[in-house]
Amino acid sequence: MSNRAIEHVVLLDANHQQIGIMDKSQVHTAHTPLHLAFSCYVFNADGQLLVTRRATSKVAWPGVWTNSVCGHPQQGEAMADAVRRRCLYEMGLPVEEVELVTDNFQYREVDASGIVENEYCPIFRAFSDATPAPRASEVMDYQWVDLEALYQGADAAPWAFSPWMVKQLALLRTLEHFTPATQPVQVG
């Protein structure tokens, strides 16, 4: 995305076809319309997954742990480009090998404040060995974790995580091709 002052979301109908755009600052209310988003899970060369803790200044689900990065592609923006843009914006993190894991995820959840999230949300995986530099308005903390430990944590304490990540992890766990980065081959 260029230096646009206003970020928008792409509004969708029930068949995931674009029906318009809306200013991002106005879309998330008690009556949030269905819109296009994405979630990304970033792995490092050690096979660990980056999880982030949402800033307490966030309108919905402040302070909860969630996946590496979430965002909204801009009209006409390729999803992989949106993932790369948002990884840099939220986490100061350049990513490689951005790939779609599944486009079979949609959810609607209501935050304790009454804010509704209503997204068709394809899930991506990416890789990075850079050191995150989170933007304080987006992320208050982060950790690199083992995927199996995250599965166990989400099972044991789903209330500590974003509801979309808990649901995504349940789906991702069933996909044979959703695994951490393979370990580099040791030579010598």
Image (cartoon, grey):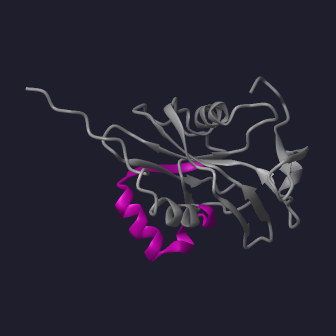
User: Which one is nearer the viewer's eye here, 90 or 124?
Assistant: 124
Quadrant placement of the C terminus: top left
- Residue 83 is situated, as x and y percent measured from the top left of the image, at 62, 37
Q: Nearer the viewer, residue 1 or 120?
A: 120
Quadrant in which the N terminus appears: top right
Which residue is outermost to the left? 188
Q: Which residues are magenta?
A: 138-164
Q: Percent from the top left, x then y, of residue 33?
A: 86, 59
Above or below residue 122? Residue 175 is below
Residue at far top of view: 2
* Residue at 81 percent of width and 55 percent of height: 15
Horizontal relation, residue 166 to residue 1: left or right: left
In the image, farthest residue toward the bottom: 156
Q: Quadrant of residue 167?
A: bottom right
Q: Nearer the viewer, residue 130 or 57?
A: 130
Q: Is residue 138 visible?
A: no
Q: Residue at x 49, y 59 (%)?
A: 172
Q: Position of residue 8 (x, y in %)?
A: 84, 41
